[in-house]
Amino acid sequence: MENLFFFKKLTDKLIDDSGCVCDKYDFSYTNQGNVYPLKQKGSSTITLSEPKMGTWKIQEDGLTLKKKVTITYPDFLKGPTGIACVNAEIGLCIIWTNKALTQTGYILPVEGGDTFINGKRICRFEHTFLPGEIINDLELSLIMYIKRPAETIEPGEECLINEAGVTVGEIENVVLKLESIYMELPIEEYKSDTHPLWWIEFSQWEDPKVDLFSKENLCIYLNPTYAGCPKIGDDIKNMDMLIEIISMSYYLIFNRLSNEDLSATKNDIGLNPNSICSIMHQFLLNCDDIHWESPERLLASIRMNVAKLLSGGDEE
């Protein structure tokens, strides 16, 4: 019942018919008065990196985003065949959610950045998250809502919502992954004299293209009883062992995927944000070459890429 609405909602057809075009987000950060652009990979789930300095950290440097949205035929969104009354005003905003800190908020167009030029509507967004305001992940949902209801409802518009503040549809949704590669994997400590140094547990996935990449579905357990345990709290003391554990874990996850799910993972087809397949797709985007010819070559190529990513690109 969660997808049942009693008023008309934005559809892909309405987005296309209105000529709604969303430019890609532009991400950057500022350090000592200088602005540095961030490189992004992915579409529905995005990873960010700083290609020149290589020192950007979201907790210490913050994040600035910019975006432009153009609606060529805004009148298509109004009237009986649209989502709002002719005399109403439609607003655009970005809803952001940081699950790690259970925080959410909204970003409105910049002052003077919601304009009509030759009949086209152009909205410009810009927002800066200060150091420490967000960590680990950031979901950005671009939505339309009723900014100002119509005082007069025209014939045929009775089926349209006409209440200020009500969301009438989502245009775009992206998720930023702001964690390091090893923190993508849910890791827990389990101190025991009878358990091994590490192990991984999986649940019975229903659909890894949808099931979340979370400890409810998979989790690595590290046993700090052993002197060789690679990670205690936030401290890493045995990088070589951590590389081996992360590499084997990714290898085991790939082996649990069906041929169909593996193909969807490689090609980013039908992947929900933060799903198991989506996170594995992001891992592949950060890799050089992954060799699928044999289990031995697959594991070896995974290990080589994990070592390179965890060492900041120094591993050959």
Image: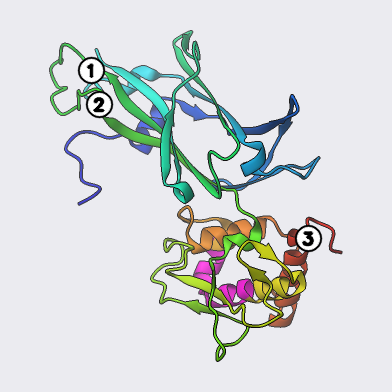
Q: Pinpoint residue 21: horizontal percent, then vertical percent.
A: 50, 28
The quarter of the picture where residue 185 lies is bottom right
200 on left or right of 292:
left
Q: Nearer the viewer, residue 85 or 73?
A: 85
The residue labelled by disc 3 is 311
Label 2 Cα crowd, 10 Å radius (few <14 / some 14-19 / many 20+): some
Is residue 255 found inside the magenta-colored segment of the image? yes
Q: Is residue 272 above or below residue 195?
A: above
Q: Pinpoint residue 196: horizontal percent, then vertical percent.
A: 60, 87
Residues drawn in magenta: 249-264
Which quadrant holds the C terminus? Answer: bottom right
- Residue shown at the point (58%, 73%) measured from the top left: 254
Residue 44 is at least partly visible in this image: no
Q: Secondary structure at mark 1?
A: loop
Q: Are marks 1 and 2 in contact (CB under 8 Å)?
A: no
- Residue shown at the point (15%, 15%) measured from the top left: 154
The quarter of the picture where residue 132 lies is top right
The residue labelled by disc 2 is 81
Residue that sits furthest to the right in the current view: 316
- Residue shown at the point (20%, 41%) measured from the top left: 5
Label 1 Cα crowd, 10 Å radius (few <14 / some 14-19 / many 20+): many
Q: Amino acid under label 1?
A: Pro
Cα separation, mark 1 vs mark 2, equals 17 Å
How was the colour assigned to the protein in this rendering? Answer: rainbow
The residue labelled by disc 1 is 149
